Image: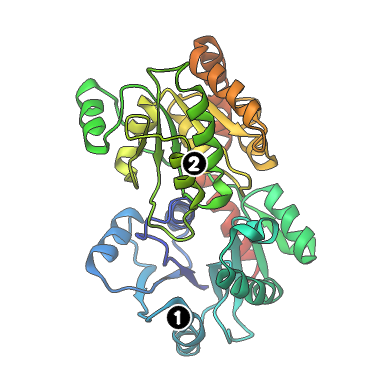
Amino acid sequence: MKIGIDIRNIGKQRTGSEVVVLELTKNILKIDRENEYLLLTDTDEKSVLDYVRKNLELEGKSNVKVVSLKAKNKFIWAGWTMPIFMRKNRLDIFHTEYILPFFIPKDIKVVTHIHDVSFKVYRDMIMKKDLFFLDLLIPKSIKRADKIVAVSQFTKDEILRYYGTNEKKVGVIYNSINIKDVEVNEHKARFLRKKYGLPEKFILYLGTLQPRKNIPILIRTYAEIKNKIPDIKLVIAGDKKAHNFDDKIDDAINRYKLTGEDITFCGFISEEDKSVIYSISTVFIFPSLYEGFGIPILEAMSRRVAVLASDIPPHREVAGDAALYFDPYSLDDLKKKLYNICVDENLRNRLIGLENARVNFFSWEKSAKKLLEIYKSLK
């Protein structure tokens, strides 16, 4: 088969989504040397293409080709660039995320990957122009797709709930992690603390800064307990300039008159540095109102860091009993749980002792094998 995979997110610092595309693609290319793969991107920048080739480990893979299809924006790419390419280069299968290109030939089988449907649940947290296109195009994509990949059972249930598609059309392929197992020594820890401006002890959040991530309640909670844990600061790792930044984050900081002595915004953390940053944190917190999976929870667990997570179904699905959970709408519950996990070393050690089993349950190799089975079923 000739299989086209949309890899536009790779090299774009899109956190979770980029990790999923990169790891699934890399692992399926490791196990499948029979089918032909066209990896489709929208850039011809040498640095990005070099990053793609290096991180997908393409050297020596004769059945793989990276194809640059430049377009001014994603709408031109979907509405003009891709349809022309598909007519000139007949694919057997095309795999993308969420929204499909327009005018896909009927004989091409389509797989679309859906990480979550938060835009159906928390509509007031999504920009109106984004909602317009999501409401217009997602139903069309789900109807046209031959197979939909959900990243968790929770996400599958949500797709069925909001779009009513055939249950057999939706498969679950779990995400996983491939964080580098880097030795943490005093020199490396000191170097990264200086690089990112990190304090000696800190509570870590790592992810996007969108409204559904619920960062304002984390900031409010920390502000109200910081005097009880004066030696532990708050570190928020995420790009404040990224799409759909939550303005209420700044409102919470201003309301409590917090300074750089209290909270560090360290920006995007590279894949090379993430392992050490997790390892030197005191606690990892993931306070989201809504997720499809929650890769950072697994990443933190793999580095033996105690995790405090919002009590939502996908977090329970991922972490099981290896995390401490809190009501994401309750400031009081979060205050109690955050204080306890920060000061109670026995609690942290108990959680850490349960983490290994959860981390080992998930594997990109196993997920890639399931994806290949989906491709073969569409033959």
Q: Residues within 10 Å of mark 1 (few under 14, many from 20)?
A: some
Q: Is residue 59 visible?
A: no
Q: Is residue 276 left or right of residue 175?
A: left
Of all residues shown, which one is farthest toward the top?
Answer: 346
Which of the two residues, 156 or 286, is positioned nearer the viewer here?
286
x and y, in percent, of residue 7 in the image: 43, 65
Say which amino acid is labelled 2: Ala
Q: Residue 115 vs residue 64: left or right?
A: right
Q: Nearer the viewer, mark 2 or mark 1?
A: 2
**Image coords of residue 354 (percent x, y):** 58, 21
Residue 185 found in image quarter:
top left
Measured Cα–Cα span from mark 2 to mark 1: 39 Å
Name the residue rendered at 80%, 65% in the picture: 164
Q: Quadrant of residue 104?
A: bottom right
From the image, which quarter does the C terminus lie in?
Answer: bottom right
Q: Amino acid at mark 1?
A: Trp
Residue bearing mark 1 = 77
Name the secondary structure under disc 2: helix
For disc 2, the marked residue is: 252
Q: Residue at x 44, y 40 (%)?
A: 253
Reading the chain from its start, which is encountered first: label 2 or label 1?
1
Which residue is at 73% across, 55% downward? 158
Residue 281 at x, y percent in the picture: 39, 26
For the point 55% across and 24% down, which residue is it?
Answer: 338
- Using the rendered image of the protein, determine whether residue 254 is visible from the camera's viewpoint: yes
Give the secondary structure at mark 1: helix
Using the image as rendered, state which of residue 336 and residue 99 is in the foreground.
336
